[in-house]
Image (tube, grey):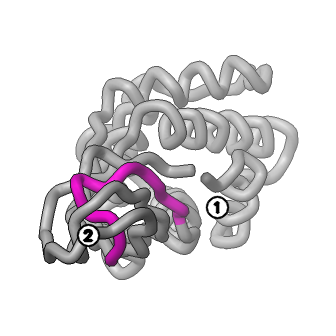
Amino acid sequence: MPTPIEITGSIKSFDTLGLFDGAFGVLKLQGLSQGISTWLSTIYKVSSVSVGVGGVGACTGVMNLNLGGAVGVMEGSLSTVGQMTGPLVFGYASAMGLGLASLPYRIAGPSGGVGTGAFSVLGGIGEPSSLYAELGLGLTAVGYGGVISSLELQGLSQGIVTLFTLGITGGGTVQGSGSPTSLTAPNPPMFVV
C-alpha cells in the first residue's frame, strides 16, 4: 500500500500552484495522505474474478486508477459536493486526482476456488463517510490547525471514493495448489497491501 509519505509525494508533484506549500499546506497534505492511506488499508476493498484451475490459491497483483478521468472526477466532487468555487479548484483537483491516480496500488487476497491462474479487477468497494472520518482523523493526528470545512472533506471523500471505485483496472496471478479442473470464480474481497 502506498504509505502516507508516498501519497504526499505524488500529490505534491502535481501541485503546480503551490497549494500545499508553507507550514499549514504541508501539514494539511500530510493529514489528508494519512487519512487516505489508513482508509485504503483498513476499509477499502477490491472485487475481482479469477480464471485458472480449481484449487486453493492466493491472488497478488496491481490495481490502477483511471488517470484520464481523475481531474474531472475530483473537480466535479469538490465543486458540487464540496461547494468549492474559484480558480484554485482546478489546481486542487489536479493535484489530488493526478497524484492519487498516478500511483500503482498492490492488492492481495484469497482466490475464490482457483488454485493457479490469473485474476482481473472488476471494481472497488468503498463509501465516502468512512473516508471522511479517516481524513478528519489524519488531519488531527498530524496537528493540522488550519481551516478546512466539512464540505471540503465531503467533496474530497466523494471524489476519492469515485476514483477508487469506478474505472479501475488491474489484475495479477493466482498461485497455490491446482487441480486438473478449469474454473472461473469470483474472489472474496481483496485489500490494498
User: Please, is residue 80 above or below residue 48 in the view?
Assistant: above
| Residue furthest to the right | 23
Q: Horizontally, is 44 left or right of 77 in the view? A: right
| Residue furthest to the front | 180
Image coordinates for residue 21, horizontal then vertical, percent: 80, 53
User: Please, is residue 146 above or below residue 40 in the view?
Assistant: above
Q: Horizontally, is 46 left or right of 4 in the view? A: left
The residue type indicated by label 2 comes to: Ser
* Residue ID for mark 1: 11
* Rendering quarter of residue 178: bottom left
The answer to whether residue 65 of the structure is visible from this angle is yes
Element marked by disc 2:
strand
Element marked by disc 1:
helix
* Residue ID for mark 2: 179
The residue type indicated by label 1 comes to: Ile
Give the residue displayed 65% in from the left and 55% down from the top: 2
Q: Which residues are magenta?
A: 105-117
